[in-house]
């Protein structure tokens, strides 16, 4: 873990050069240095350079671009790349991955930079910013093809004009399609449709060998399975075809408080099994004493034309929540999807968005979910979660989670426990303490058959990754050898 910004080492500076506000035009293999227009004019290091092939976008080494790529939403790990590619086309990604493979330069794809522990960073390598690849194609045959850099908010707005919607969303919509497909993409609709990675029908990728490939369940199926929830280890996602379903015009949104965690968990599991609601999640709030012991079940029923007119009595029948404090409201569908936007805007205005986010994201087996969750929650204080942090706890359905690299407990109804912490700025001691707590919680859950959902901040070693992937490890290792033979992709994950 690196809590301070990593300055370019002497070796990195010699290997890649440190230019300011200048586009890269070539690479000098003998000096192992990038050449910019300025250095090329006065003679590149080593007396010559290999031209970077013409690009539709730009390859830059200015300090601002490199500093931005050395950050992520976690604000914990800082690895500074040597250059940043802002592609103008998929061909740019192909060209530069081939170039980097030839010269042994590590490559990290980056969407919206919402990871929390340096997963999309690379020290001294090339960051490919996928955000320019943000096209959204026409809706055809119940699907839409989009660029990897398209944000889910824009995809939803586009498809809703046709009365259609992607079936699964993460709670925060301003994430890139390529980014969430690379980790899985879990949300309140997962119990009905699987992860976002389960709702993609085709992927357009650039492998670590620099090959542009379209893959699907029937074409290059091994690559398709290695990329979905594959953490960027075999290919850069540049586009995806997404399955769509009928969208509701409005939804009925319930928040139901409980006194007992076990009762809440049982009711959640019942609802997901019955498919009574279209969306099921849950929060755990601090009570008056500051203990995280106040569970709230959150559920949403879709209205016409995606479902019948919601009937509160039928929807809530048999649930054991407390009537005091329960709420129900009818919302426009997109307003519901984008419900975090006001909070995010407020956090940005107050400067909290840039605080460290040492998140803990775990997948618990339902057989021991109450004891495992209670063991973690009992040790939490409001200070451990932070002023804008939140604790989520809700069930999934294992049978619908078919992407082989999205590792789950061997349990029909695993639970996602997400302690979405914020930490004080300029307080590395607190961040280190919370990272150690994350690691301890992970080990307890792992020993009980659980997994991590790898978007958070848990110190991990290569041996941990082997254990995490388990029986899927040989498949991932073989795909890595086949599709990224030089091993240049996504080094920030620390898997290989």
Image (cartoon, rainbow, N blue to C red):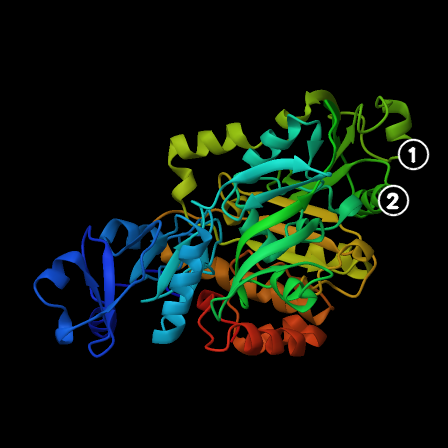
Residue occupying image coordinates x 41% and y 39%: 352
- In the displayed structure image, the side of residue 287 where residue 190 appears, left or right: right
Disc number for residue 270: 2
- 74 in relation to 387, above or below: below
User: Percent x, y for residue 339?
Assistant: 60, 30
Residue under pointer 1 = 318
Q: Is residue 459 above or below residue 347?
A: below
Badge 2 marks a residue whose secondary structure is helix
For this view, does 264 lie left or right of residue 341? right
- In the depicted structure, whether residue 468 falls above or below residue 138: below
Work out whether mark 1 precedes mark 2 in sequence or the reverse, and give the earlier one.
Answer: 2
Q: In the picture, which quadrant includes the N terminus? A: bottom left
Q: Which mark is residue 212?
A: none
Are circles 1 and 2 on residues that touch, CB within 8 Å?
Answer: yes
Q: Residue at position x 41%, y 68% from top?
A: 98
Q: Position of residue 148 (x, y in %)?
A: 53, 49
CA gap between label 1 and label 2 equals 10 Å
The answer to whether residue 185 is seen in the rendering is yes
The answer to whether one can see residue 8 in this image is no
């Amino acid at each position: 873990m690196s809590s301070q910004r990593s300055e370019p080492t002497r070796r990195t500076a010699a290997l890649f050069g440190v230019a300011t506000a200048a586009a890269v035009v070539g690479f000098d293999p003998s000096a192992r240095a990038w050449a910019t227009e300025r250095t090329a004019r006065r003679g590149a290091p080593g007396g010559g350079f290999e031209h970077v092939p013409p690009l539709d976008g730009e390859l830059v080494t200015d300090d601002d671009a490199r500093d931005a790529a050395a950050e992520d939403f976690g604000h914990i790990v800082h690895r500074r790349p040597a250059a940043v590619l802002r592609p103008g086309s998929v061909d740019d990604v192909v060209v530069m991955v081939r170039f980097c493979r030839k010269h042994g330069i590590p490559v990290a794809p980056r969407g919206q930079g919402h990871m929390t522990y340096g997963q999309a960073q690379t020290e001294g390598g090339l960051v490919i910013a996928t955000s320019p690849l943000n096209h959204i194609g026409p809706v055809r045959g119940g699907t839409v093809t989009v660029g990897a850099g398209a944000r889910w908010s824009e995809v939803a707005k586009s498809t809703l004009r046709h009365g259609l919607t992607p079936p699964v969303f993460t709670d925060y919509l301003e994430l890139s399609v390529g980014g969430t497909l690379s980790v899985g993409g879990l949300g309140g609709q997962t119990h009905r449709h699987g992860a976002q990675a389960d709702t993609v029908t085709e992927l357009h990728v650039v492998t670590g060998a620099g090959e542009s490939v379209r893959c699907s369940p029937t074409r290059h199926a091994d690559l398709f399975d290695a990329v979905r929830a594959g953490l960027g280890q075999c290919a850069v996602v540049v586009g995806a075809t997404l399955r769509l379903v009928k969208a509701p015009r409005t939804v009925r949104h319930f928040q139901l408080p409980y006194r007992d965690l076990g009762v809440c968990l049982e009711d959640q599991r019942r609802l997901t099994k019955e498919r009574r609601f279209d969306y099921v999640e849950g929060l755990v709030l601090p009570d008056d004493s500051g203990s995280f012991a106040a569970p709230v079940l959150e559920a949403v029923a879709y209205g016409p034309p995606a479902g019948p007119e919601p009937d509160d009595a039928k929807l809530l029948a048999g649930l054991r929540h407390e009537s005091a404090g329960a709420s129900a409201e009818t919302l426009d569908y997109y307003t519901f999807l984008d419900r975090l936007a006001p909070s995010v805007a407020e956090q940005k205005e107050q400067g909290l968005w840039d605080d460290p986010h040492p998140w803990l994201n775990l997948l618990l087996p339902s057989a021991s979910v109450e004891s495992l969750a209670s063991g973690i929650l009992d040790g939490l204080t409001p200070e451990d979660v932070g002023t804008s942090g939140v604790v989520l706890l809700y069930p999934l359905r294992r049978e619908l989670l078919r992407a082989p690299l999205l590792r789950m407990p061997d349990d029909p109804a695993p639970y996602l426990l997400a302690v979405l912490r914020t930490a004080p700025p300029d307080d590395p001691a607190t961040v280190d303490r919370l990272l150690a707590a994350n690691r301890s919680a992970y080990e307890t859950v792992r020993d009980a058959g659980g997994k991590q959902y790898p978007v958070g901040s848990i110190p991990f070693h290569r041996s941990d990754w082997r254990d995490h992937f388990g029986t899927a490890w040989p498949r991932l290792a073989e795909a890595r050898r086949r599709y990224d033979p030089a091993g240049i992709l996504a080094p920030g994950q620390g898997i290989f």
